[in-house]
């Protein structure tokens, strides 16, 4: 006889019974062939409940609303489901707001890339804009603000353009909205000239790469490269972060 408990759900399986709170029990029977999924028969819930429905948090629909039962079961056992679904009611996050703020500024030598190590805690299914603040404008030279994966792939960027006014800039991502999974990233900044200055934080935020540390990565035409060789982690407990955000 198999016995196991799913913590946090108040569900106890004993042999062929599923015990729910208040002493209720529901028979557990195999679904289909292969034995990779189980179905909980409960007439008051309008039919069988699949593993997929439990994983997706959707008990009212007779059809699982995301992926497949086998995929969800695998994700549950590996712990990947919580990351993939963003921890925000299953829908993911709408915004990412970094820790940088207006008490510091950073500019860049021409045609070099600056990076800021950031962590995005929740998946953003549809990121359409990058948000930052310009404190010294440059209406002459092209510049680009970008987001790289920890592996060095370009995830999103504004595209090379002039940032000729100061203040908070909400710039559309070149090529349209993208999906941004949760994880570690680099916010990036480059310019043809050395005039443009963006807002950054003071030296007080933990980061695996502090904004302003030279990367040695060259750029051309004021555009972020399509991929980079990411620098080695350079942890600072009181590092500098670029004032950076992601919006729909």
Image: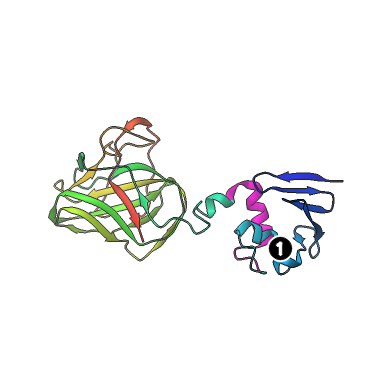
**What kind of element bears circle 1?**
strand
Q: Is residue 235 above or below residue 105?
A: above
At horizontal 29% and vertical 58% (from top left) the residue drawn is: 158
- Start and end of the magenta stretch? 63-80
Lateral position of residue 148 relative to residue 87, left or right: left
Residue drawn at x 34%, y 65% as measured from the top left:
175
Report the front residue among 100 and 20: 20
Q: Is residue 122 magenta?
A: no
Q: Main secondary structure of the magenta part?
A: helix
Foreground pick, 46 / 195 = 46
160 or 133: nearer the viewer? 133
Going by the picture, which residue comes out furthest to the top?
237
Q: Is residue 213 above or below residue 218?
A: above
Q: Is residue 158 left or right of residue 141?
A: right
Residue 39 sits in which quadrant?
bottom right
Residue linked to disc 1: 49
As drawn, the residue found furthest toward the front would be 22
x and y percentages locating residue 196 in the rendered image? 16, 48
How packed is label 1: few (under 14 Cα within 10 Å), some, or many (20 or more)? many
The residue drawn where x is 59% and y is 63% is 66
Q: Nearer the viewer, residue 86 or 224?
A: 86
- In the rendered image, residue 189, in percent from the top left (x then y), is placed at 27, 48
Say which quadrant the C terminus sits in. Answer: bottom left
Q: Position of residue 43 (x, y in %)?
A: 76, 67
Res 159 visible = no
């Amino acid at each position: 006889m198999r016995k196991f408990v799913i913590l946090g759900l108040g569900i106890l399986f004993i042999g062929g019974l599923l015990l729910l709170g208040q002493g209720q029990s529901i028979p557990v029977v195999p679904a289909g062939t292969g034995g990779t999924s189980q179905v909980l028969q409960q007439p008051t819930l309008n039919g069988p409940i699949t593993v997929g429905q439990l994983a997706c948090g959707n008990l009212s629909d007779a059809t699982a609303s995301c992926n497949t039962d086998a995929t969800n079961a695998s994700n549950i056992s590996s712990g990947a489901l919580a990351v993939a679904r963003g921890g925000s009611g299953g829908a993911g996050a709408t915004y990412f707001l970094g820790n940088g703020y207006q008490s510091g500024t950073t500019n860049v030598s021409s045609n070099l890339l600056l990076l800021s190590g950031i962590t995005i805690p929740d998946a953003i299914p549809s990121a359409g804009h990058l948000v930052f603040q310009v404190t010294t404008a440059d209406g002459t030279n092209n510049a680009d603000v970008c987001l790289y994966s920890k592996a060095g792939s370009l995830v999103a960027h504004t595209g090379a353009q002039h940032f000729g006014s100061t203040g908070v800039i909400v710039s559309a991502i070149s090529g349209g909205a993208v999906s941004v999974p949760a994880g570690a990233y680099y916010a990036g900044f480059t310019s043809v000239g050395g005039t443009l200055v963006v807002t950054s934080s003071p030296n007080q935020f933990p980061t695996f790469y502090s904004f302003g540390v030279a990367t040695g990565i060259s750029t051309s035409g004021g555009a972020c490269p399509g991929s980079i060789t990411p620098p080695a982690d350079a942890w600072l407990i009181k590092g500098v972060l670029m004032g950076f955000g992601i919006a729909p």
